[in-house]
Structures are given as structure tokens and as C-alpha cells.
Image (spheres, coloured by chain):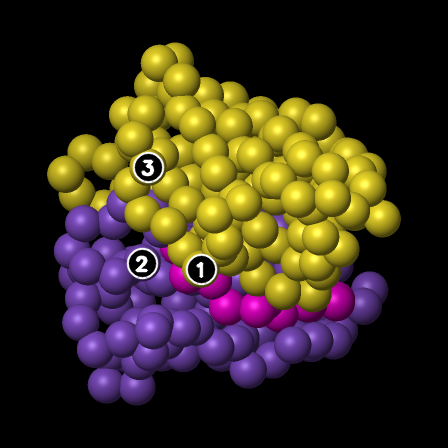
Chain colours: A purple, B yellow
Amino acid sequence: AQSVSQHNHHVILSEAASLELGCNYSYGGTVNLFWYVQYPGQHLQLLLKYFSGDPLVKGIKGFEAEFIKSKFSFNLRKPSVQWSDTAEYFCAVTVGSSNTGKLIFGQGTTLQVKP
Amino acid sequence: ETGVTQSPTHLIKTRGQQVTLRCSSQSGHNTVSWYQQALGQGPQFIFQYYREEENGRGNFPPRFSGLQFPNYSSELNVNALELDDSALYLCASSLPTGGVTEAFFGQGTRLTVV
């Protein structure tokens, strides 16, 4: 069965530090990749997505992610985090060339940014 | 705001009871997916409805069932509640257009089974 692994469960950073959150998936075929963020008390929001094309994807709020097919990875990065980035981050995939919204999520990474 | 609304926001039920959760999809979206998010875990896919028909199901027992109505709103029903059913239940709507589409999530219903 397909699965998604997020290696960092809880990350604590100071403001202005750089961020990289790891995400690996297990599926050998076509995948569509997503990063979602869940701020305290709010709904899941899409940060960025990769369907095809340039493997370096830029999202909202200065986030970016790189799809490395050979490593089955889709790591999330931000050069300089802010206190407002404190949230839960989820990597997710759908399989196949046509996304029907059946997302497979990782277990999430809690990011705490200290002011 | 995503335009996806869920009700109720919080719910407390007793083990063995039945519960119905509701989701109103974003305008024009004909596909609704339901997820269960246990504390400290990522959301897990329960099932999806497309144009009033079930269109895929995750690894959940038959006591988890659903409906989608002609206006594309949806219900999730859980019978014979167990303590482990305590979780945040998320609804997501999307509009498949033949390509890859984005799912928009509601704020969820927090179910506590005691």
C-alpha cells in the first residue's frame, strides 16, 4: 500500500532560521504531491502542489518544495521562518495521472517558531 | 475561507451510539471526500462521493457509511461508536476536471466518544 513518511515529528526553530521538512512516499508510478498547513484552530490549507513539470515548486508565504523522483522525496523548505509559521505541516500524495482527491497523508510535523 | 462548511463543530457521544456529521461542499464542487484525523496523526481517507455515488473507500469498517445529495452536500454516518472513533473528521470538496485538482477542506467536526 502507498504510504507517506515525514521524518521530523516536532521541529523547534528561532525566527529567521531556515526550514527543511522531509517527506518521502512509497509508490513507483505517477504521483501528485502536496504540502498542507494547519494553523491552530484553522482548516487545512494548501501550501503548494506538484503535478508535473519543473520539480522545484513555489507556494504561498515563501515556501517551496523540490520533487526528487529518484529519492521518492518532496521536501518542504523556507529560507527564513517567522513566528506566524508555527503550525502543523502535512505532506500528502495522490497516485495516478488523474487526481480524484484521495489524499494519502503523512503523520505531520509540528513546527514551533520561537520569537 | 474555503467555502466548505461542516456541522456540528464539536460533538460528544456515548460508546454504542450512532452519529451523523454533515458537510456542505464549495459551490460547484461535485466530489466530497471524508477523512479521520486522530490526535497526533495525519488525516486518513475514509471514502469519497462523486455525483451521489461512492467512489473509493479507505480501510474503514462498514459501520462508517455516507451519503451525497443532489446539491453535492454530504453526510458521514458512524454506527456503534467505539472509543477509538474519537477524532477530528474532515470533509474536503473538489471538482475533478479530467486533470489534477485541488481539494478544499472544512474546519472539521471534533467527535469525542465516551
Q: Residue at x 69, y 46 (%)?
A: B81
The answer to whether one can see residue A85 in this image is no
Q: Are marks 3 and 2 in contact (CB under 8 Å)?
A: no
Image mark 2: chain: A
Q: Between residues A83 and B9, which one lies in front from this camera angle?
A: B9
Q: Residues within 10 Å of mark 2 (few under 14, many from 20)?
A: many
Residue B105 within the magenta-colored segment of the rendering: no
- The residue that disc 3 covers is B54
Report the amino acid beneath label 3: Glu
Q: Label 2 belongs to which residue? A: A94
Residue type at numbered disc 2:
Thr
Q: Is residue B73 visible?
A: yes
| Residues shaded magenta | A103-113
Q: CA distance from mark 3 to mark 2?
A: 18 Å
What separation in Å lies between label 3 and label 1 (alpha carbons)?
14 Å
| Placement of A93 over or under B107, stated as above or below | below
Q: Crowding at label 1, few (<14), some or many (≥20) Cα neighbours within 10 Å?
A: few
Within the image, what quadrant is residue A68 found in? bottom left
Name the outermost residue toward the bottom. Answer: A71
| In this rendering, position of residue B65 left or right of residue B13 | left
Mark 3, other Cα within 10 Å: few <14 / some 14–19 / many ≥20: some
Instruction: From the image, tell me which residue sits under label 1.
Output: B59
Q: Nearer the viewer, residue A43 or B66?
A: B66
The amino acid pointed to by label 1 is: Asn
